Image (spheres, rainbow, N blue to C red):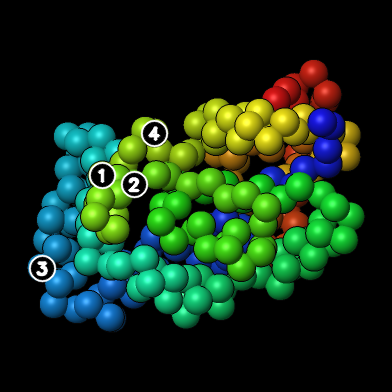
């Protein structure tokens, strides 16, 4: 089924912040003692990544370490108290317009699906994709399952969900927004692709692709 689609990055696009940093700060605020003892390990892994001793995946798993202390309910509270409050008004307008025009909305990010999944629950999007974490005994572990949802991996994940839903992107009439050129693979899936300002989600630049470059 050919359909108009709206593709949205989340960090610094839908919201005016980096949700992973926000989560770390939130963990320090709400679970200080459990989180503070993890900070030296996080700093060590980030330093080792900077020195190219460990991979980006290992460094990112370290950043996610505090998530082991959070229940599903607490992750939803984080979404409501922090993430939801930082959604850019410009993106609210774009999402509302897409809904009115029956455009399929898909959010996709390198941040954990553990908490960004609530964008779907609260009906900001039809589907939301993020980096998957291991889930055991009703809690998430700081272990990435599969690949980090970034760059070319976003294309793979988008193709998978659209195939599952039997949706083919209407290239000419679809839209995509991101704050970063690292998302050029995703942006190339549509004709109407835009880079936005990190602070407020306002359009900064239109990216031009021809129809042969956009393939889903």
Q: Which of 208 and 19 is in front in this view?
A: 19
Q: Quadrant of the N terminus?
A: top right
Tell me the residue that label 2 is attached to: 133
Kindly identify which numbered label has been placed on residue 37. 3
Q: Nearer the viewer, residue 53 or 3?
A: 3
Can residue 24 be seen here? The reply is: yes
Image: 20 above or below 208: below
Tags 1 and 2 touching, CB below 8 Å: yes
Mark 3 or mark 4: whose residue is earlier in sequence: 3
**What secondary structure is marked by label 1?**
strand
Can residue 208 be seen here? The reply is: no
Image quarter of residue 25: bottom left
Mark 3 or mark 1: whose residue is earlier in sequence: 3
Tell me the residue that label 4 is attached to: 147
Kindly identify which numbered label has been placed on residue 143. 1
Tags 2 and 3 touching, CB below 8 Å: no
């Amino acid at each position: 089924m050919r359909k108009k689609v709206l593709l949205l990055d989340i960090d610094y696009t839908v919201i005016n912040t980096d949700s992973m940093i926000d989560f770390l700060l939130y963990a320090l605020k709400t679970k200080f003692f459990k989180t503070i003892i993890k900070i030296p390990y996080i700093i060590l892994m980030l330093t080792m990544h900077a020195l190219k001793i460990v991979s980006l995946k290992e460094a990112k798993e370290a950043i996610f370490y505090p998530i082991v202390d959070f229940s599903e309910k607490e992750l939803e509270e984080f979404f409501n108290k922090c993430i939801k409050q930082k959604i850019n008004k410009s993106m609210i307008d774009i999402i509302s317009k897409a809904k009115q025009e029956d455009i399929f909305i898909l959010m996709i990010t390198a941040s954990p699906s553990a908490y960004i999944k609530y964008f779907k629950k609260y009906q900001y999007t039809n589907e939301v994709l993020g980096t998957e974490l291991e889930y055991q005994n009703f809690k998430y572990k700081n272990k990435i399952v599969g690949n980090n949802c970034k760059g070319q991996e976003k294309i793979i994940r988008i193709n998978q969900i659209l195939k599952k839903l039997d949706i083919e992107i209407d290239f000419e009439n679809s839209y995509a927004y991101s704050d970063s050129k690292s998302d050029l693979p995703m942006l190339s899936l549509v004709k109407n692709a835009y880079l936005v300002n990190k602070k407020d989600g306002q359009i900064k630049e239109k990216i031009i692709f021809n129809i042969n470059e956009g393939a889903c």
